[in-house]
């Protein structure tokens, strides 16, 4: 919580709006699943709508303190990514994903670590003709952000790409981790206490033994334009509302 009660009220209101809109999306997803089960399971328009609803929930879950919801959506996207006919039994499994999301949203808070691990372990798997080939980057990443939910979600996406992640909520600690571990990439929120992300990146870049370490700054899309002015051109940025896609792009440009 912040020291500004007005800001806290705004954040709480945005979270309530997210919960309300997500519950509406979940009702729409229930209807889509029922319609797809009653048809031949290959309605392209309905499947496109379904994937779009899941992608929208995934993109905002972490922002409003529900990183596990975003992770479940990510897993669901993986199992329904193929353009093929799905069976009624497979849609029953898809419904389980939706039900887990609903249970979390209805609770009003993300589960603790133990409950989150249990939920992820119980998610069903759907066999598909083609399996996604994951990259194995083996990159060493230092991740620093004061936002616990965003940190958890970024860690998940980076680990999914085969990265070794060292995370912290302190820019001072991130500087120490960078010096001690010589990472391939440092990802930092712009807004940090003590030392902001831009100054942290400059400090790291000024050290000769870290000259090959790349810097990426996390910010919102609304601030990304302003961020591009006045920072070293070699710095990249990751938009928090496009977290998965931007992380993938930054990793594409990072080499060991």
Image (cartoon, rainbow, N blue to C red):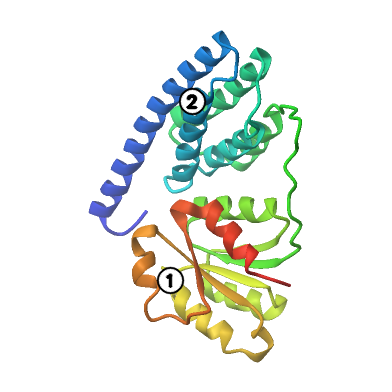
Q: Disc number at residue 48?
A: none
Please tell me which residue is depicted at 56% across the width and 40% down the height of the picture.
68
Residue 31 position within the rendered picture, expressed as x and y whole percent measured from the top left:
46, 16
Instruction: Place residue 75 in its image quadrant.
Output: top right
User: Tag 2's secondary structure?
Assistant: helix
Which residue lies under the disc numbered 1? 193
Foreground disc of the pair 1, 2: 2
Mark 1–mark 2 contact, CB under 8 Å? no
Using the numbered discs, state the Cα–Cα distance from disc 1 to disc 2 in whole angstroms: 47 Å
| For residue 41, above or below residue 205 | above
Residue 140 versus residue 79: which sits nearer the camera?
Answer: 79
Residue found at the far top of this picture:
38
| For residue 51, above or below residue 170 | above
How packed mark 2 is, by other alpha carbons closer than 10 Å (few <14, some 14-19, many 20 or more), is few
Please tell me which residue is depicted at 40% across the width and 59% down the height of the picture.
220
Which residue lies under the disc numbered 2? 45
Please tell me which residue is depicted at 64% across the width and 56% down the height of the picture.
158
Horizontal side of 154 relative to 30 (left or right) equals right
């Amino acid at each position: 919580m912040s020291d500004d009660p007005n800001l806290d009220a705004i954040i709480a209101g945005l979270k309530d709006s997210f919960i309300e809109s997500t519950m509406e999306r979940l009702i729409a997803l229930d209807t889509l699943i029922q319609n797809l089960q009653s048809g031949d399971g290959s309605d392209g328009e309905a499947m496109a709508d379904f994937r779009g609803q899941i992608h929208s929930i995934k993109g905002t879950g972490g922002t409003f303190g529900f990183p596990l919801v975003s992770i479940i959506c990510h897993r669901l996207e993986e199992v329904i990514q193929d353009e093929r006919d799905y069976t009624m039994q497979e849609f029953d499994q898809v419904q389980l994903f939706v039900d887990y999301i609903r249970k979390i949203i209805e609770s009003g808070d993300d589960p603790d670590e133990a409950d989150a691990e249990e939920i992820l372990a119980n998610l069903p798997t759907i066999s598909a003709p083609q399996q996604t080939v994951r990259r194995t980057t083996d990159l060493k990443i230092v991740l620093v952000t004061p936002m616990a939910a965003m940190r958890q979600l970024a860690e998940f996406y980076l680990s999914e790409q085969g990265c070794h992640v060292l995370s912290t909520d302190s820019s001072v600690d991130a500087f120490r981790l960078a010096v001690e571990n010589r990472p391939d990439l440092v990802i930092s929120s712009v807004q940090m206490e003590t030392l902001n992300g831009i100054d942290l990146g400059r400090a790291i870049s000024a050290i000769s033994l870290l000259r090959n370490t790349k810097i990426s700054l996390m910010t919102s899309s609304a601030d990304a334009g302003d961020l591009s002015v006045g920072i070293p051109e070699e710095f990249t940025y990751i938009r928090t509302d496009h977290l998965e896609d931007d992380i993938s792009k930054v990793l594409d440009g990072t080499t060991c």
